[in-house]
Amino acid sequence: MMVCSKSNNNKPIEEFVLVSPAPVDTAAKLSNIYMKLSEKEKERAKDLIAAGKQCEAMATELLALAAGADSAGRILTSMDRRNMEFLDVLIENEQKEVIAHTVVQRYLQELWQGSLNWNAFRTILLFISFLICPPVWVAFALPLGHKYNNVPIIKFMSYLTSHIYLMVFLLLVGIIPIYPVVRASLLPYWYEWCLLVMLSGLLLFELTNPSDKSGLGWIKLAVLLFGICGVAFHLMGFVLVQRTSWPTLLYLRNQLFALSFLLACVQILDFLSFHHLFGPWAIIIGNLMKDLARFLAVLAIFVFGFSMHFVALNQAFKNFKSIEEARAEDRKKKDAFHDGKFDAYD
């Protein structure tokens, strides 16, 4: 169909889309198919990309015409055969131009604000109040008789505030602790109790409302798992590990909390991809994570090679003062990989 369309001014593609039962859905999915094929068919990549762009432009125009003067909500919330909303179909098929269209953004703006007609300044001021005054955050997040907790933008700010507080407590516990980590008793400090409460709340929320693991959703679970492992290491000091080994145990605990903090920083990208203003970013950030994984793979190769070279530089070699000393050294029994062992403090 792409070959026929190339020589007939895209007429076959247009007719195929228009006679289908759901033209907008067909155009969006067909665009993604052509884009995926262009990555495999290098010889015809240019023509396939052009066909994909044509389908994406048709999907944008058809959606605008179908929405008309009304909101595009009916179309964007309609289900396909997989019971997936059309908005999710657009994101899955990486239709950035369609998502960025005015009718889609207008619908998302209405959905995002709900019944809350606040300007941007009041919204930002409320978010700052959430950060500097936790009681305000609790009052808006809990169902205390008002309807603010059901407004999407308030729920988003509540989740983001909770995530920032989690990062702060992970920072205080595992990276820059206020009080000495190694102490006479393993009873938690006040900020360690706060971290335990937040991790318990996240675990309860994950058990009652399992999150989506697709895309960046797995990071949320990884943050929770590393945090729970850190708590488990702390509890091991009460029953399994002797007092003399507490420094090593607490060091390992802090490393787990530091890994959890690192993943929590990456999870901020998941919040950005959720925000309505970053509609196309949900696609861009997903591609960015793939590129980041490739970069880390290449970086790991160079780091491994440099580490091995550093080990070679630190091998213990010394000249002998006499032949007798050399012969005495030869008679010594040495274990396997003896020369590969070195002390960093030598």
Image (cartoon, rainbow, N blue to C red):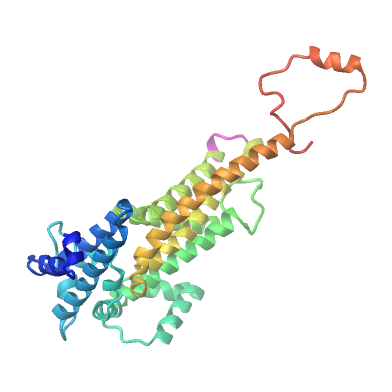
Q: Is residue 218 magenta?
A: no
| Picture quarter with the C terminus | top right
State which region is magenta.
238-242
Residue closer to the observer: 71 or 44: 44
Relative to 130, residue 122 above or below: below
Magenta-highlighted stretch: main secondary structure?
loop
| Residue 332 drawn at (x, y percent) | 78, 14
| Residue 192 falls in image quadrant | bottom right
In the displayed orientation, state which residue is furthest to the front.
7
| Picture quarter with the N terminus | bottom left
Residue closer to the observer: 99 or 207: 99
Side (left or right) of 303 relative to 132:
right
Residue closer to the observer: 63 or 121: 63
| Residue 160 falls in image quadrant | bottom left
- Image point (69%, 28%), residue name: 340
In the displayed orientation, state which residue is furthest to the top.
331
| Residue 143 drawn at (x, y percent) | 30, 71
| Residue 119 drawn at (x, y percent) | 37, 87
- Image point (69%, 40%), residue name: 310
Residue closer to the observer: 196 or 97: 97
| Residue 283 falls in image quadrant | bottom left
Relative to 77, residue 250 above or below: above
| Residue 304 drawn at (x, y percent) | 59, 41
Relative to 328, residue 69 above or below: below
